[in-house]
Image (cartoon, rainbow, N blue to C red):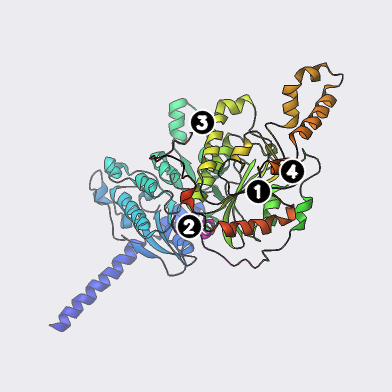
Amino acid sequence: MEEIRNKENYELIEKLERKREEYKQGGGPAKVEKLMHAKGKLSIRERIDLLFDQGTFVEQYLFAKSQCKDLGMDKIETPAEGIITGYGKINGRLAYFYGNDFTVMGGSLGRNSNLKSSYISMQAARVGAPLISMVDTAGARFQEGNMTQATSQMMVNIANSGYIPQVSAIMGNCAGGGAYIPALTEFIISVDKTSRMYICGPEPIKQAIHQEVDPEELSGGYTNNAISGNTQCLAEDDRDCIEKIRLYLSYMPQNCNEMPPVYACGQDPDAMIYELDDLVPDNFNRAFDMMHLIELVADRDSIFPIQPLFAKNLITVLARLDGHSVGIIANNPMHLAGCLDVDAADKMTHFVDTCDAFNIPLIWFTDCPGFMPGIDQEHKGIVRHGAKACYAMGMASAPKIGVVVRKQFGASAVAMGGFGQNMDMILHWPFFRSSSTNPEGSVKVIFRREIAAAADPEAKTKELAAEFTQVMGDVYTTAERLICNDIIAPHETRRRLIQELETLRTKNRDLVFQQIPKKRQGIRPV
């Protein structure tokens, strides 16, 4: 009797192994070759192998299948329901995952696939670990109709927002309302040439407004990253995308209740960087390489640019100082003179919110002539977009340090780490200048009649601007007025930032808004 029972057990275990391998095949090798490899994409299983540390991925809900039997679905197999879910380790730290298997009905979303992604997302929140999604889907499964909305991944993403890091990789198609699922996560990567993310595709656009549009131009990886700003990073291919996911998470804590990991730096924290002393030109209006400044200050090879192709007039990077994660925001004098415009304001807002949510200190390097003037910017809503950046900056309670490199004109002082925004430390380089506008702009308003009557209006403007600058005072005037905490030489910057950040590690963020009345929430400008 015992022998028969053991034989039955063996057969059941054998069946389990066969089923497991069958389900892991998805649509099968032929579809992997045709739908993935032939188009320059990796299969979902290959992507998982690259994302997680070797041998650590544990799959969940492998044996899920569609329960729909209508409209021919009774003849279609949906192994793993076209979506892979599970958890594993990335750089030795726990992370959760879901990703579409395009070889199974184009990775389309049915009731059970929605349930799978929602369940794994809720598990990630329960244990307080990052969540990664890889999007490669034909969209909602039409055969299941409204059943696809039985659970809302969007609501789970909203609930998890700011609690755990959420990363979305667009590694194929992402269309219609489903595009809002990754859009509700804080870090989105698009893959060049093989990804598409859009609400309305080329064919519906043609039918609705009779406009022919190239799919890559409309919604390709470059478009979403550099033009629309929908994504924070552009990858060359699937492998590069996965490397960038792993890199991004290395700057992040597991959740908002933890601090980011600390890495060995190997550099002397007290070293002086004398190259910084010669970086800023004598000519006030000449541009310089702000990214090089950041590279000199940050730990060697620690910089990870965020949205480098979008709103190039503003630099946002994750980096490390003495092994600790920091978020750096800087004007870029080499693009639009470092002015803040609508796109730069949006870019800064999202970056500040992300760093603030995950306990990453914020550092501003300012050389800003102000907000961009012009009818185009006014009509696009520079007032409300600029207010959005000011709101995010003022509400951030993570450690905040401002370094004013050269100029800080107009309202840029409010948005770019200036006085009166709950800053923990404001440091000025000795080249600092400040006024409500550019000095020449100011005198053109104050002395417009005198300039108009002058024999040489341009020379008169420069003369008056020099007088205006004298009256407004220099960097020592601002220090006398307690506008900054200290004036430092450029070569001292790295050491001073490391010192200040060390003192701010015990900052009580609950005390920042002690005077604000109790309320449900503030209302962010849109």
Q: Which residues are magenta?
A: 242-266
Q: Are marks 3 and 4 in contact (CB under 8 Å)?
A: no
Side (left or right) of 175 relative to 364: left
Residue 212 disc label = 3
Q: Which residue is mark 1?
A: 485
Q: Dot 1: what SS? A: loop
Q: Position of residue 33 (x, y in %)?
A: 45, 57
**Hey, what amino acid is under mark 1?**
Asn
Question: Which callout, 1 or 3, points to the residue nearer the camera?
Answer: 1
- Residue 161 in magenta stretch: no
* Residue at 59% across, 57% down: 501
- For the residues labelled 3 and 2, the Cα–Cα distance comes to 30 Å
Residue labelled with disc 2: 42
Mark 3 or 4 closer to N-term?
3
Q: Residue at x 63, y 37 (%)?
A: 412
Q: Is residue 356 above or below residue 28?
A: above
